[in-house]
Every structure is written in structure tokens, then in C-alpha cells.
Amino acid sequence: MDPTYKAVSEFAQIWGLVYFCAIFTAVAIYALWPSRKQQFDEAARIPLRED
């Protein structure tokens, strides 16, 4: 069976969405993980430091 533009487009759209959702979920878990709180709190205070 010859892949048509429509079939390739549908495949790319579906798996692109799955890929995006997986990456988004991984980043959200990384950012909201409790052990990262101190690291992000320190990073948030960087602009307020006086060198």
C-alpha cells in the first residue's frame, strides 16, 4: 500500500500530539517534584541578590 499524503499527515498529527503530551508531562513532573522546590526557590531569588 502506497502511503498517501493524508495517511502520513494523520500519522504525524497523532504521534506528534502523543510526543508533545509526553514531553509536557515529563517537564511538569520535573518542575513540580517536591525535591526540586529548594532548587527553584534559589533560582527565583537570583535577580534579587546584590553582588
Image (spheres, helix red, strand yellow):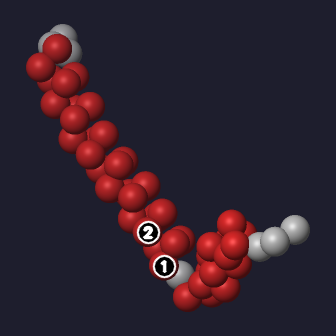
Q: Residue at x 17, y 14 (%)?
A: 5
Number of marks drawn: 2
Image coordinates for residue 11, horizontal then vertical, percent: 22, 32
Q: Residue at x 16, y 30 (%)?
A: 10
User: Could you tell me which quadrant the C terminus lies in?
Assistant: bottom right
SS assignment at label 2: helix
18, 45: nearer the viewer? 45
Badge 2 amino acid: Ala
SS assignment at label 1: helix
Residue 2 - label: none
Residue hosting label 1? 32
Image coordinates for residue 16, horizontal then vertical, percent: 30, 40
Q: Residue at x 43, y 69 (%)?
A: 28
Image coordinates for residue 26, horizontal then vertical, percent: 46, 64
- The answer to whether marks 2 and 1 mark residues whose Cβ atoms lie closer than 8 Å is yes
Image: 28 above or below 18 = below
36, 43: nearer the viewer? 43
Extreme-front residue of the structure: 50
